[in-house]
Image (cartoon, coloured by chain):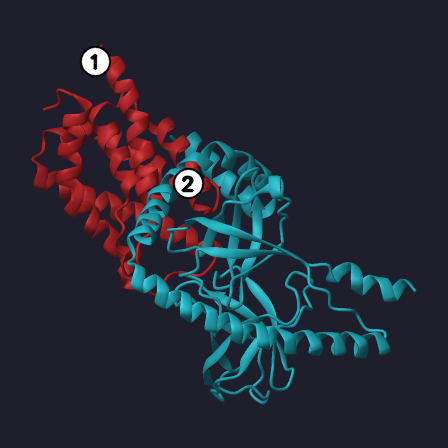
Chain colours: A red, B cyan
Amino acid sequence: MTSQHNWFVIPMSFILAFMLTLLPMPGWAIWLRPAWVLMVMIFWSMSSPERVNVGTAWIVGIILDVLLGSLLGEHAFALTIITYIVVRMHTRLRMSPLIQQGLSIFFLVLLYQFILFCIQGFIGSLPNNWLYWSSSLTSMLLWPWVYSIMRVRSDMKIV
Amino acid sequence: MIFLALLAITLMILDKQVATVSRVRAALSLPLAPIQYAVSWPIQLVDKILDTISSHDALVKENLNLKAEQLRLKAQVQRLLAIELENNQLKSLTHASVNIQGKIVVAQLLAVATDPFTNQVVLDKGGKDNVFVGQPVLDAFGVMGQVIQVGPLTSRVLLINDSHSGVPVQVVRNGVRAIAIGDAYTRKLRLTNVTQTSDIRVGDLLITSGLGDNYPEGYPVGQVTSLVKDPGLQFATVVVEPAAHLDKSRGVLLVWPQQVQKISNPVKS
C-alpha cells in the first residue's frame, strides 16, 4: 500500500518542481529562483536511492532541457553528476541534522551551477552577474521547508 | 554514471552540430505541453479575475481613452495607406519589390524561458496553425524575435535579445546597415562591426532592413541608447534598447511575410 502511494508521489513531485521552474517571475527575482528540480532530485535520491537514482536524474534532466530550451543534455549531465554524489553519500546525508543538510545542499547546488556555468562557457557567453550564484543560497534557505513538506507527503520513515 | 554522463555530453555536441536533434526536441515538446499550459493557466485566471472586478468607472475611462486612441490611429492609418499606395506605385516604376502586408495571427505567450542564459518564449500556436521555423514574431511596438522550434501545439521563439539572435537592421535617418546581436544579460542589443567612422548617433531609430529574408522590412527594432567610440578598439560599441516590450507583452503577432515571393517575381520576368 505504502509503496504504491510513494510510486505516485515521486512523479507528481517532479511535475510540481517543473512547474515551479517554469513559473514566470519579476525581472529582479530571476536569478534568485531556487533549483527546484535539483532539490527534489536530491531529496529522493537521498531518501530512496533504490528507486530514484542516476538514470532517473538523466531522464529528468532531458525533460528539463526540453522545457527550458537549453542545450539538450546540459541539465541532464549536471543532474547526473550531483545525483551520483548524493547516492554515494546518502546515508551520511540522512543522518545529519537539517542545518548541516542545508549546508551540503548549498555546496551541491553550487557545484550544479558551476557545471552549468562551464557548459555555458563552452557554447556561448557567460553571465557577467554575480547574482547568478545566489540561487544556491536561496536553495539552501528553502531546503528545511522543502525537506519537511516532502517528508510528510511521502510518508517515509527516514532517520 | 559514467555512461550516462558521456551520453549527455554526446547529446550536447549533437544538439550543437546536427540539425535532426531539433526534430527530436520538437517531438518531445508535445507530451510536455500540458505542463506549460498548467503553469500559464492560473496566471490567465488571475488576469481574468482582475478584469472582471475592475470598476465600472475605470472601464468607462479606459473606453474613452481607447476611443480617442483609435480615432488618432485611424487618422494615421489613412495617411499611411496613401503613402503605402504611393510607395508601391513608385516601386513598381523602378521594378523593385512590392511591399504587401502578409497574413497576421495573434498568439498568446504560454511560458517564458526562466533560464537566465536564454531569452526565449513559448507561444500557444504550433504546427497546427501553420507556424514555421524562422517565422518573424512582432508585438505592437516592434520586432520580438523569430520562431526556432515548432511543436504540434506550441512553438518556441528566440527573442532578439538572446545572445544567439542577430537581426539585420538599418538606421532610419540615413539607411546605414548593421546587424543587431542580442545580449542576454543586459537584455539589450549590440550592433556588431560598426566602424568608428560610421554615422550612427545616440537616439537613432533602427528598423529591420529585410536583408536576411527572415524579418519583413521596416519594423522598428530599437533605439541607440549609448555609443562608445574607443580609438583603441577596432569597432564602435553601440548599445540598442529594443523597441518591442520583450518582457511585458502577452499577446504577440505571428507574421506570414509574402515578400520572398514578391522579390523573386521581377527577377524571373
Q: How many marks?
A: 2
* Residue B256: image location, x then y, percent: 66, 55
Q: Quadrant of the C terminus of chain A?
A: top left
Which element carries disc 1, helix, strand or loop?
Answer: helix
Specify whether residue B191 is in view.
no
Residue furthest out toward the top: A1
Residue at 15% from the left image edge and 33% from the top image edge: A149
Q: Report in which chain the residue with disc 1 lies.
A: A
Other-residue count near label 2 (Cα within 10 Å), few / some / many at <14 / 14–19 / ≥20: many
Q: Amino acid at mark 1?
A: Thr
* Residue B138: image location, x then y, percent: 55, 61
Question: Are the residues tagged 2 and 1 within 8 Å (C-beta)?
Answer: no
Circle 2 residue: B36
Other-residue count near label 1 (Cα within 10 Å), few / some / many at <14 / 14–19 / ≥20: few
In the rendered view, would you say B77 is above or below A159? Answer: below
Residue at 54% from the left image edge and 73% from the top image edge: B73
Specify whether residue A118 is in view.
yes
Q: Quadrant of the N terminus of chain A?
A: top left
Q: Nearer the viewer, mark 2 or mark 1?
A: 2
Q: Residue A150 — which label?
A: none
* Residue A101: image location, x then y, percent: 13, 38
Between the residue at mark 2 and the residue at mark 1, the CA separation in whole angstroms equals 30 Å
In the rendered view, would you say A2 is above or below B10? Answer: above
Q: Report in which chain the residue with disc 2 lies.
A: B
Q: Nearer the viewer, residue A60 or A21?
A: A21
Residue at 61% from the left image edge and 39% from the top image edge: B128
Circle 1 residue: A2
Which element carries disc 2, helix, strand or loop?
Answer: helix
